[in-house]
Image (tube, rainbow, N blue to C red):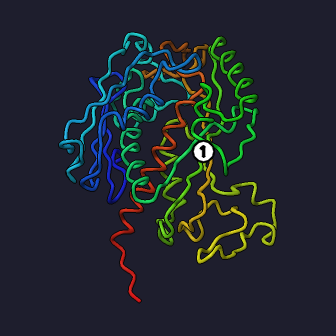
Amino acid sequence: MGSFFGQVFRVATFGESHGGGVGVVVDGCPPHLPLAETDIQVDLDRRRPGQSAIVTPRQESDRCEILSGVFEGKTLGTPIALLVRNQDARSQDYQEMATKFRPSHADATYQAKYGIRNWQGGGRASARETIGRVAAGAIAKKILHQVAHTEVLAYVQRVRNLEAQIDIGTVTAAQIEANILRCPDAAVAAQAIAEIEQARREGNSLGGVVECVIRSVPVGLGDPVFEKLEAELARAMMSLPASKGFEVGSGFAGTYLTGREHNDEFYLEGDRLRTRTNRSGGIQGGISNGEDIVFRVAFKPTATILQPQNTVSVAGEETTLRARGRHDPCVLPRAVPMVEAMAALVLCDRYLYQQTVRVLG
């Protein structure tokens, strides 16, 4: 079913936006990995609501509880259960949505598919489900860093038509976290924050692009044909709420180049095979080549806005809806740790899978 992800490092998220809590079960984590709740809390704090003036004001501490799979500070190799309890749900704000479908949201399609839905805060379709992904991603990041010193960094690259100028090769976590937008370009961040605040005042929302760079990637991750690494990353990113597009390396811009211009020429750095350019985005033939993996994810404007919109009721009557509740005027700042988490889950799963492959010769 749709709540499971991965083949070797497997995760299953659970919970609804206004239920008792949300969380994840992680299966396939190797034993002896040092792990504490504080390791996970760092990324949960980056994802949580109420952290700044440009995200939803819902107040949740999002404190992580490890229920199983860890003993005396180390993983056991058994399933790890992680739970975050909901504390600040206001289900009454969504009463009108019990009978009316929100435009561009999951209400109508969930109703059509299951014949029943949790209309309180979007239920399973809420971005609150991503708590489980981010918690599991924190474990995956720790594994990747331990085995290969892999670093996964995502940041806001564009808000609407405001595009940041960022040096992919040198950008740091400190630069990303230097402002509430998580955009390393301070000048563009200031402009974008002002536009997001204006959209909030108007009861509207904005979209944009999150870019991600992954450094120190082991060579050989991914498989030809149906399980190419970029295909696995695309699947992961497109499973995130509000995601609408994915591109890797040169992406769509590469279509403006000739083959001669686009190809990444090889050279030797000692005994290591390198590429002089990285338009492939660190992946060739569906397999990581050791260069930085670079990709971008497009996120639409938040679907739930506080302006009147035409819609249809559950009873099949045309009507209007002015949503209430607490919503992000722009998902991008909180999407950054979500993108990092999904990227880490893909690479960790592919790394552990690769350990089962033995090459003769």
Query: Label 1 sits on what residue type?
Result: Val
Quick check: 16 left or right of 97?
A: left
| Residue 310 screen position, x and y as percent | 59, 19
The answer to which quarter of the image holds residue 190 is top right
Does 239 appear above or below 23?
below
| Residue 88 screen position, x and y as percent | 36, 14
Question: Residue visible at 31% across and 30% down?
Answer: 64
Q: In the displayed orientation, state which residue is furthest to the front.
A: 270
Question: Residue visible at 39% across and 82% down?
Answer: 359
Q: Name the residue nearer the viewer: 149 or 222.
A: 149
Mark yes or no: residue 111 visible.
no
Residue placed under numbered mark 1 in the picture: 297
Q: Name the residue nearer the viewer: 1 or 89.
A: 89
Quick check: 55 left or right of 119?
A: right
Q: How many marks?
A: 1
Does 231 appear above or below 300?
below
